[in-house]
Image (cartoon, grey):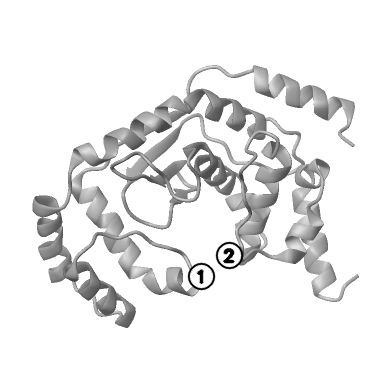
Amino acid sequence: MVRPLVALLCLLSFSAVGENLFRITPPTAATEFRYIWQLLQNIRFYEEHNYNVALPEGKWISDLKEKARRGDLTPDEFERYQTFFSQHVFKPTDYERGQQKIESSFKRLNEFVVFVKNQPYSWQFKQFETYQLKLTLYGPGGDYDPDNGTIRIFTTPTGSFKQYADPAYTIIHEVVHIGIEGSIIQKYSLSHAEKESIVDRIVLLLLGNKLIDYKPQPFGSSDVANALSTIEDIHLLSDRVQQVFRKNDGQE
């Protein structure tokens, strides 16, 4: 049951939306290739966790992936292929439709983020006045930088997105990642699966009635998911995470 005070805060949160909380930054050829290089350097992690990572097409990228798996990428290859990418692959117009679709969802996104940020947490949910959105044609779908509030989101030249037709789903997921990174994830040294489970539970419990197509990641932690079954569990997230660890360590 949702307590009266919580219900009132929820209502006020959805109505207290002011200026836009998001800014979109289209990539340059240089920034996009640096991201591709970062993806290649981490390709073994993505493959181990069954992420579907979009990369440019062609034999050149297949060769680089093989070298990345062996840890054999070199600075000379970075310079050579960055030039190739800039001259033969990168097109600024490929990002226009995705940007337009994200901008059309700003009103809903602002409402969702204000609602999530204004919950009566007993722990610190990290917030930014503005979240910077970086578009990309590559990667697993989205990622984030908790130090500066940057969110990278995948799109296509036709304006589609990974996992969901509505980009708000992925953006909210990454906003929650940023919010819990320091006070929960780093504090308790959580695993990748535990981290993703917490994010999924927060989104589902707080916004499940708004983001009705949201689906939890398949590799999450059942222990964490089972410990977070109510909105109050999210408000007391730090306590709940500690309880899960104590139980797993045989201290309860």
Badge nearest the viewer, 2 or 1: 1
Residue for point 17% across, 65% down? 78
Write down the quadrant of residue 117 in the picture.
top right
Q: Quadrant of residue 246?
A: bottom right
Sequence order check, earlier mark of 2 and 1:
1
Q: Is residue 51 left or right of residue 203?
A: left
Disc sitting over residue 74 in the figure = none
Give the residue at x 63% y 51%.
Answer: 199
Residue 49 in the image, given as x and y percentages of width and height: 51, 70
**Quadrant that contains the N terminus:** top right
Q: Residues within 10 Å of mark 2 (few under 14, many from 20)?
A: few
Q: Residue 49 bears which disc, if any?
A: 1
Residue at image coords 79%, 41%: 231
Say which of 84 and 146 sits in front: 84
Mark pair 2, 1: CA separation = 9 Å
Residue 190 falls left or right of residue 109: right
Q: Secondary structure at mark 2?
A: helix
Q: Which residue is mark 2?
A: 192
Labels 2 & 1 near each other (Cβ < 8 A): yes
Q: Position of residue 150 (x, y in %)?
A: 43, 42
Residue 107 in percent (x, y) is at 52, 23
Amino acid carrying mark 1 in the image? His
Q: Nearer the viewer, residue 168 or 232?
A: 168
